[in-house]
């Protein structure tokens, strides 16, 4: 139920999460049972997969800005992901020849998410965790993400 509540709360904050199809819990013979069903994130790849393929500098810049904005929105809203790994951050970039690439970030696996009274606590926890589990993200790209994230958090 914690994950269900997190999906609903983040969606209300404007953070992209998989669309909920069904979620419920019950106590059966003294044991809790729960079921959570979400729609697939069609066209998205994980941040981990992102760094296994080549992308243009423009696509990467838009992805970093969108990621920074998404994480800042979640943290400003008082939520901590709790398991902020590259495999739980999903990206979709749609190139448009007449405009900038449209970039979407979605977060999933929110079973360890929780409310934090201070956004700084949520930020500190998740960003340290993402740094440790950011896959093949180069250090200079991490620094760009942190710059964009700090700007989005203050913005």
Image (tube, grey):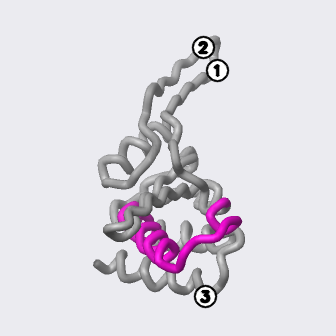
Which residue occupies 42% across, 68% down?
A: 66
Residue annotated with mark 1: 31
State the image quarter where residue 152 is shown.
Answer: bottom left
Q: Position of residue 42 (x, y in %)?
A: 51, 42
In primary-sequence order, the first of circles 1 and 3 is 1
* Residue located at (28% from left, 78% from top): 155
* Marks 1 and 3 close (CB-CB < 8 Å): no
Q: Which mark is residue 28?
A: 2
Q: Would you say 17 lies left or right of 33 here? A: left
Quote the CA–CA distance across marks 1 and 3. Answer: 48 Å
Camera-side residue of 34 and 87? 87
Q: Which mark is residue 79?
A: none
Q: Which residues are magenta?
A: 49-75
- Whichever of callouts 3 and 2 sits on the residue coming sooner in the sequence is 2
Q: Which residue is found at the position 64% from the left and 20% from the top?
A: 31
Disc 1 from disc 2: Cα separation:
5 Å
Asked whether 155 falls inside the magenta stretch, the response is no
Label 1 CA crowd tier, 10 Å (few <14, some 14–19, many 20+): few
User: Image quarter for residue 28?
Assistant: top right
Q: Secondary structure at mark 2?
A: strand
Closer to us: mark 3 or mark 2? Answer: 3
Within 10 Å of disc 3 (Cα), the crowding (few <14, some 14-19, many 20+) is: few
Seen from the viewer's position, the closer of residues 145 and 34 is 145
40 to the left or right of 77: right
Magenta includes 73?
yes
Q: Are marks 1 and 2 in contact (CB under 8 Å)?
A: yes
Q: Quadrant of residue 33?
A: top right
- The residue that appears at 62% across and 68% down in the rendered structure is 129
Does the magenta stretch mainly form a helix, a strand or a loop? helix
Disc 3 marks which residue?
Answer: 140
Locate residue 67, reporting x and y percent. Answer: 46, 67
User: Percent position (x, y) of residue 96?
Assistant: 38, 63
């Amino acid at each position: 139920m914690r994950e269900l509540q997190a999906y609903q709360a983040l969606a209300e904050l404007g953070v992209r999460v998989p669309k909920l199809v069904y979620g419920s819990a019950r106590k059966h013979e003294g044991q809790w049972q729960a079921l959570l069903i979400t729609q697939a994130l069609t066209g998205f790849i994980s941040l981990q997969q992102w760094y296994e393929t080549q992308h243009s500098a423009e696509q990467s810049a838009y992805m970093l800005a969108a990621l920074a904005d998404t994480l800042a929105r979640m943290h400003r809203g008082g939520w901590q992901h709790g398991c902020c790994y590259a495999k739980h951050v999903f990206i979709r970039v749609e190139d448009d020849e007449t405009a900038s690439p449209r970039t979407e970030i979605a977060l999933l696996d929110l079973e360890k998410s929780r409310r934090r009274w201070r956004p700084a606590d949520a930020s500190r926890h998740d960003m340290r965790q993402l740094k440790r589990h950011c896959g093949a993200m180069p250090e200079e790209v991490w620094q760009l993400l942190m710059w964009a994230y700090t700007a989005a958090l203050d913005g």
